[in-house]
Image (cartoon, rainbow, N blue to C red):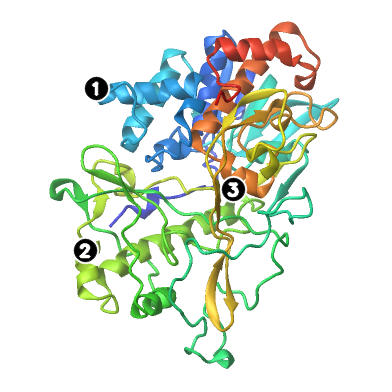
Amino acid sequence: MADMTSLFYWKPPTGTQKPHTRHADLCVYGGTASGVIAAVQAARLGLHVLLIAPERHVGGLTTGGLSFTDTGRKEAIGGLAREVYSRIGAKYGKAEEWNFEPHVAEEVLTELLAEVRVVPYTGQFLAAVKKSRGRLVSLTTEEGLTVEAAVFIDATYEGDLMAKAGVSYTVGRESNKTYSETLNGYQIRDKHQFLKPVSPYVVEDDPKSGLLPGIQPRPLAPGSGDKSVQAYCFRLCLTKTPANKLAYPKPEGYDPRDYELLARYIKAGANEFFNKFDPLQKGKFDKNNHGGFSTDFIGANHKYPEAHYAEREAIFQAHVRYQQGLMWYMGNEPTVPAELRERWSEWGLCRDEFVEAGGWSRQLYIREARRMVTDTVMTEHHCKGKLKVEDSVGLGSYNMDSHNCNRVVVDGFVKNEGDVQVSTPPYAISYRAIVPREHECKNLFVPVCLASSHIAYGSIRMEPVFMILGQSAALAAWLTIENGYPSVQQLPYGLLEQALKQAKQVLAWKK
């Protein structure tokens, strides 16, 4: 069984660290791949950088299980992001590699930090910030570390520094009317959907018996906005290699009744359970969500973006319990046909990945949390090429991809709601989408929880793009500091554009 004591999002402060203050040119808050790249770029330019990470391991999802990289068009990926995949490739004797073992990605990002002598402060959760005259002056963590800096970057998946700084943001889905979109808000579509009729009621086909947990009684109007965010899961690194395989753990609190919908779906003839075991290196595979009932814990995460740390920890543990229980259920419960159980049990966790947690990923896939609201908001019109920006800091190119948000009852049967998958050509992301409005904060960049509608974020939210935007933010921070500009908003784009091109960022798509 996995060591559950090492699978956590947050633990209360230990009280063993004495309060102390550090000073820097640039403070990067967030140990995601975006945060690491921002810190590396700034340090290479000679800035004194402090990387403050709530995480215990750097790299976020890039090192936490999302190893089958969502690239979109690889030609749209340049700069340090491309260097990361080249360095990963070198570990395997290749020019570059996009599908890799998690520990190899962590080695690469750790080596990049070591080369520029940036030692991350890990396990540091934000407690408070200090502002003066519209500028962030310092942040303080729960462990008592205070960092004073000229410029800050919020590279977290949650946007916690942005929120503490008083920057405008939103959570959930806008209605289609907000930005004249067509793919936002409430959506029932055919992908990752129940392909067989399944009753949502406690007693099958009896509405009077009530609904099974996690199901809403009725759909909304198509395109309606709400506070739902797309589902989270753990991206697992699996193997069939006997010498490296660990059996799925049966989690504490496991209850087979939590998978009643799955039991009914299997009984109805569903057979879509092996479509997202994507090959990596050395006999390993990246397991992602696929189908009507899978690793996404649909509807269980809507409070996460705004929750305090203890509540987020409870949500994190609920996701651990759900997904470990699902993996165990599929391989062990007699309600699952023997042939399916046997095939499922051919796979297991990797003994040599996430060793401290028994092979289980330590990073919950936060597909979406807060999103900044500022003068330029990226929308589906940008993704489709109908709106252009003149201040590009990098390209997005992946599909507009929202995972399901809810389960609802439609005509007496359960349906998943929220999944949207629409292709897009490469498009430019605006500098104004990664900086707040000037009157809200003059010295903050937000390259991960940037200004974007829900559906546009479904395209932008890919790890290579976050690295691209982290590097661009660091370059802009350097130029702002070196030239003494009074705010990041007043940095001339022409100056930034020149630096971005020198850094080999791809700023425009050439057909």
Q: Is residue 275 placed above or below 333 in the rendered structure? A: above
SS class, disc 2: helix
Position in image of residue 204 (x %, y %): 47, 88
Indicate the amino acid at tag 2.
Arg
SS class, disc 1: loop
- Residue 256 quadrant: bottom left
Q: Look at mark 2 in the image and give the residue it sits on.
A: 343
SS class, disc 3: loop
- Give the mark nearer the N terminus: 3 vs 1: 1
Q: Is residue 344 placed above or below 309 in the rendered structure? A: below
Indicate the amino acid at tag 1.
Gly
- Crowding at dot 2, Cα within 10 Å, few <14 / some 14-19 / many 20+, comes out as few
Q: Look at mark 1 in the image and give the residue it sits on.
A: 93
2 vs 3, front mark: 2
In-image side of 243 versus 48 (left or right): left
Q: Dividing the image into 4 quarters, which one contains the C terminus?
A: top right
Tell me what residue is drawn at x 78 percent, y 54 percent.
177
Q: Is residue 476 placed above or below 146 in the rendered structure? A: above
Position in image of residue 217 (x %, y %): 63, 78
Q: Dividing the image into 4 quarters, which one contains the N terminus?
A: bottom left
Residue 245 visible in the picture: yes
- Residue 426 quadrant: top right
The label on residue 368 is 3
Indicate the amino acid at tag 3.
Glu
Q: Pointers 2 and 3 in contact (CB under 8 A)?
A: no
Q: Distance between the residues labelled 2 and 1?
A: 33 Å
Tell me what residue is drawn at x 58 percent, y 92 percent.
208
